């Protein structure tokens, strides 16, 4: 466990303001994430996350840091702790995982990161690391920054101390010069460093050590030989620079590389500090050379910015954190853009003071940056663009406001002189797009007033090349809480709250937003050390009461985490007491146990659906059923239906369908004259939602869920819905049919036959026509599938559905169990890999194309609008995959 946290406050914060500076005001992640942000860019080091799946599964490959020196920083390593590991301890497993990691990746160093669960149960990672270091002969370094000890900022500082304790000062450079500098806190996001370093080189400066963007472990070991430390993100690693000044006598300066003004200031400040260490005859020459470089770069910049003169006078709302919170003010002002509001929720007191230095005492600093208030600021202040992090992208997009992402998930470099041109181009493109499409009209928001059978899963033929290991490398698995959170997005006016450290929610929300490209409703109880020690029932109460007062939800789901489960929180009792305190509210509150040390995305989703049915579906008199056809279907037999109109049908849908699939499914069912109650209904995430809310909008309404007990029949789609459909059967005697797949020719035939028999109506002609077209398309494409080996690495329900239509096409399918294997363990000779966006590097390693589907998909556009079910969706899949296979054939 981390101790002595005061040193991070003392060295990095004004002690009289340490609470505001070092304790999160919300809107950011946890200490674990902060430590990873600092350390993971080291390109030749491996990072093992010692804990259950959520910490690694939600974050690996999620940051925009780039490197020219290796790809280990893009890989995820986790011990994926199970419940048995928590009960009996997992230090031996961790030791074996370290050895396995070295054997697999041959890193120059290994960092082992504690998480909330491993920290809480007292795993001695220092002892394990020391033992492994002796065995391997490389540095194996413990990082004690579990999420509950504090916010991301504190994790940054802990990581800096780790480098000071285990790396800096342990090596020597081949040679040194009078112009050697270290860059501290520069992570080469989107290649920022690559736009700055050439300018520094032209000025005669040499970067001795990069801490840590585009760095190697070795160069960090000799950082103590630099002549000057240049701190780029002062909030994160100022303690590192101050310690190096005391210990090694290296002075430091704080700079920013964003914008012309700050870049020029940085070059001159570096020059002024270094010239004191240079022999007098060379000082003038050095200084003059730097001024010539500045003059030339600024001249080229002015020429490059002539194409963006139209930006002068535009107005921007800025919301980011750390050094960016004030340095981007300067960059925007360099472009002639007026800053009309600045969100400070993620900024420190020091950051705020720098903002005031630039804009004056009346700087428009705004603490409240909730989505509603951000939208109000954009409207009231006539802003032309929102400059913020990726989580706010869809807030702007939904309301028709231009947006530029400036946080760590971005894909464009903005540092240096050239970076300012990139920023101008991105802003200009966004403004021009919305102006040309007249998207501003959408700001006048129009509120839409309309408002069993076999479930066996033994289809997977696991590849003989896959073996369970102590270390999960590049995990495919995701946590139960992510799955449950997805399910709640399909219920109108719902809000899932993860009961755990704030990083659980932050990282999960980032991942969900990247996948769905929509605002995601997700909150956190934000547990810190005092909550872990003293109890956290009050945290649940305060968060839930606050949500109800501000947003008036119809449903709140409390999702437990590994941390809250291991520490033994009685969430059920907390909810019971809470319901007593809020009797005036119509909000339903349910508990879903989703610890990340068991199960995965699909099980968490299924648990949420089952909990909703258990808690909300009302017990109604069977004589009041919608159709009055109670009992017309013999048990588990759909083949004897009576002719009827307005037959209500429950439809329980697994997590494997896209938002567009939900719309397609509803259309299919309604075309037979049936009335479906779909739970959950993720068509709410198809891009059609209007308005901004902290709650999920669209989806199944609570009143509809209550009425599910009146329906005559239930269709369950996906084996994961087995428990939920059985619960409806057991409680309300509603007959059902379970379908493992609704894609492919034969499985779609079964769906159509089922709907036809339920309604007593023939299959509509349009689907008969779609079927003929699919058959024709399958015949055209089958040449490309014959004898092809296709590896699928997908969640179980999607894996079954995909393998079945691939089998129809004549392909040989190898299914990977995503809950037990990582991408790194996939070996063999295949013709195609079907998996999520994380599998891009794996496909390259295997030398095969990648067809992206499943979760998460964020490297291709249109995934959520892709129909993958029914005759029409199957034809699309058949053709798209055949096109990839045809390239292999060539």
Image: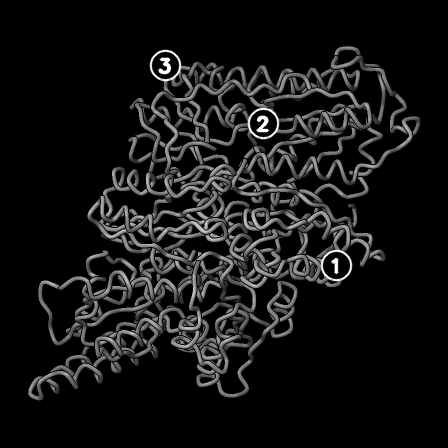
Residue 267: horizontal and vertical position, in percent? 25, 78
- Label 3 sits on a secondary structure element that is loop
Q: Are marks 3 and 2 in contact (CB under 8 Å)?
A: no
Label 2 to label 1, Cα distance in Å?
38 Å
211 and 53: which is toward the camera:
53
442 and 290: which is toward the camera:
290
Residue 548: horizontal and vertical position, in percent? 74, 59
Front label number (2 vs 1)? 1
Front label number (3 vs 1)? 1
Q: Residue furthest right?
A: 623
Label 3 to label 1, Cα distance in Å?
57 Å
Q: Are marks 2 and 1 in contact (CB under 8 Å)?
A: no
Residue under pointer 2: 869
Q: Is residue 795 left or right of residue 790?
A: right
31 and 70: which is toward the camera:
31
Quadrant for the C terminus, please.
top left
Res. 785 mark:
none
Res. 787 mark:
3
Residue 33: horizontal and vertical position, in percent? 44, 57
Residue under pointer 1: 548
Of callouts 3 and 1, which one flags the residue occurring earlier in the amino acid sequence? 1
- Label 2 sits on a secondary structure element that is loop
Label 3 to label 2, Cα distance in Å?
24 Å
Neighbour tally class for label 3: few under 14, some 14-19, many 20 plus, Cα within 10 Å = few
- Label 1 sits on a secondary structure element that is helix
Q: Are marks 3 and 1 in contact (CB under 8 Å)?
A: no
Of callouts 2 and 1, which one flags the residue occurring earlier in the amino acid sequence? 1
Quadrant for the N terminus, please.
bottom left
Instruction: From this view, report whether residue 154 is shown above or below residue 797.
Output: below
Residue at image location 53% in from the left, 42% down from the top: 596
Neighbour tally class for label 2: few under 14, some 14-19, many 20 plus, Cα within 10 Å = many
Residue at image location 15% in from the left, 80% down from the top: 289
């Amino acid at each position: 466990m981390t101790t002595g946290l005061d040193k991070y406050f003392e060295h990095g914060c004004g002690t009289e303001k340490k609470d505001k500076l070092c304790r999160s005001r919300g809107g950011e992640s946890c200490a674990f994430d902060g430590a990873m942000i600092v350390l993971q860019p080291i390109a030749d080091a491996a990072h093992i996350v010692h804990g259950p799946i959520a910490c690694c599964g939600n974050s690996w490959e999620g940051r925009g840091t780039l490197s020219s020196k290796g790809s280990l920083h893009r890989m995820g390593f986790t011990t994926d702790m199970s419940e048995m590991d928590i009960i009996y301890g997992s230090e031996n497993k961790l030791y074996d995982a370290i050895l396995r990691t070295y054997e697999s990746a041959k890193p120059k160093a290994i960092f082992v990161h504690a998480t909330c669960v491993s920290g809480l149960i007292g795993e001695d990672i220092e002892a394990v690391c020391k033992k492994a270091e002796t065995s391997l002969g490389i540095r194996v370094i413990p990082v004690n920054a579990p999420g509950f000890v504090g916010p991301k900022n504190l994790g940054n500082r802990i990581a800096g101390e780790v480098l000071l304790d285990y790396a800096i000062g342990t090596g020597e450079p081949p040679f040194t010069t009078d112009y050697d500098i270290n860059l501290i806190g520069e992570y080469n996001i989107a290649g920022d460093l690559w736009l700055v370093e050439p300018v520094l080189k032209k000025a005669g400066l040499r970067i001795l050590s990069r801490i840590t963007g585009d760095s190697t472990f070795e160069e960090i070991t000799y950082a103590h030989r630099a002549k000057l430390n240049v701190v780029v993100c002062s909030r994160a690693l100022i303690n590192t620079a101050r310690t190096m000044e005391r210990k090694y006598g290296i002075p430091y300066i704080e700079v920013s590389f964003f914008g012309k003004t700050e870049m020029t200031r940085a070059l001159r400040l570096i020059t002024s500090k270094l010239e004191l260490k240079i022999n007098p005859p060379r000082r003038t020459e050095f200084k003059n050379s730097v001024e010539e470089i500045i003059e030339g770069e600024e001249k080229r910049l002015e020429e490059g910015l002539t194409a963006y003169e139209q930006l002068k006078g535009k107005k921007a709302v800025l919301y980011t954190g750390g050094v960016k919170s004030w340095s981007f003010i300067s960059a925007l002002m360099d472009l002639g853009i007026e800053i009309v509001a600045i969100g400070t929720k993620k900024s420190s007191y020091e950051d705020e003071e720098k903002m005031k230095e630039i804009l004056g005492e009346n700087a428009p600093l705004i603490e409240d940056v909730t989505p509603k208030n951000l939208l109000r600021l954009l409207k009231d202040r006539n802003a032309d663009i929102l400059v913020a992090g990726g989580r706010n992208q869809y807030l702007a997009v939904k309301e028709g406001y231009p947006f530029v992402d400036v946080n760590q998930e971005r894909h464009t470099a903005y540092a240096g002189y050239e970076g300012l041109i990139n920023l101008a181009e991105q802003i200009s493109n966004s403004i021009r797009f919305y102006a040309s499409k007249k998207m501003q009209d959408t700001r006048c928001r129009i509120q839409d007033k309309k408002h069993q059978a076999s479930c066996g899963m033994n289809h997977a033929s696991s590849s003989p090349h896959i073996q369970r290991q102590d270390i999960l490398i590049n995990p495919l698995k995701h946590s139960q809480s992510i799955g449950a959170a997805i399910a709640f997005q399909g219920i109108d006016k719902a809000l899932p709250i993860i009961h755990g450290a704030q990083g659980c929610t932050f990282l999960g929300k980032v991942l969900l937003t990247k996948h769905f490209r929509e605002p995601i409703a997700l909150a956190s109880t934000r547990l810190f050390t005092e909550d872990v020690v003293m109890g956290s029932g009050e945290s649940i109460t305060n968060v839930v009461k606050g949500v109800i007062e501000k947003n008036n939800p119809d449903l709140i789901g409390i999702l437990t985490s590994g941390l809250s489960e291991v520490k033994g929180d009685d969430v059920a009792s907390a909810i019971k007491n809470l319901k007593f305190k809020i009797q005036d509210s119509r909000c339903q509150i349910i508990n879903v146990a989703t610890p990340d040390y068991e199960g995965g995305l699909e099980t968490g989703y299924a648990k949420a659906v089952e909990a909703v049915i258990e808690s909300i579906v009302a017990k109604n008199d069977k004589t009041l059923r919608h159709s009055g056809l109670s009992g017309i279907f013999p048990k588990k037999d759909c083949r004897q239906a009576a002719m009827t109109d307005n037959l209500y049908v429950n439809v329980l849908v697994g997590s494997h369908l896209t938002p567009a699939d939900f719309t397609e499914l509803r259309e299919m069912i309604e075309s037979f004259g049936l009335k479906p109650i779909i739970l959950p209904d993720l068509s709410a995430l198809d891009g059609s939602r209007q308005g901004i809310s902290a709650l999920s909008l669209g989806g199944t309404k609570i009143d509809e869920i209550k009425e599910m007990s009146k329906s005559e029949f239930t269709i369950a789609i996906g084996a994961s819905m087995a428990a939920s459909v059985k619960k409806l059967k057991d409680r309300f005697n509603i007959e059902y049919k379970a379908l493992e797949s609704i894609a492919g020719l034969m499985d779609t035939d079964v769906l159509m036959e089922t709907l036809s028999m339920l309604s007593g109506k023939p299959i509509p002609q349009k689907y008969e026509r779609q079927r003929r077209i699919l058959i024709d398309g399958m015949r055209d494409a089958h040449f490309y599938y014959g004898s092809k080996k296709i590896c699928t690495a997908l969640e179980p329900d999607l894996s079954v559905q995909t393998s079945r239509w691939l089998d129809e096409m004549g392909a040989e399918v190898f299914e990977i169990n995503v809950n037990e294997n990582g991408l790194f363990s996939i070996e063999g000779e295949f013709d195609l890999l079907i998996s999520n966006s994380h599998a891009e590097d794996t496909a390259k390693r295997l030398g095969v194309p990648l067809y992206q589907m499943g979760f998460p998909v964020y490297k291709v556009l249109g995934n959520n609008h892709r129909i993958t079910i029914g005759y029409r969706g199957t034809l699309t899949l058949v053709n798209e995959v055949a096109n990839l296979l045809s390239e292999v054939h060539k």
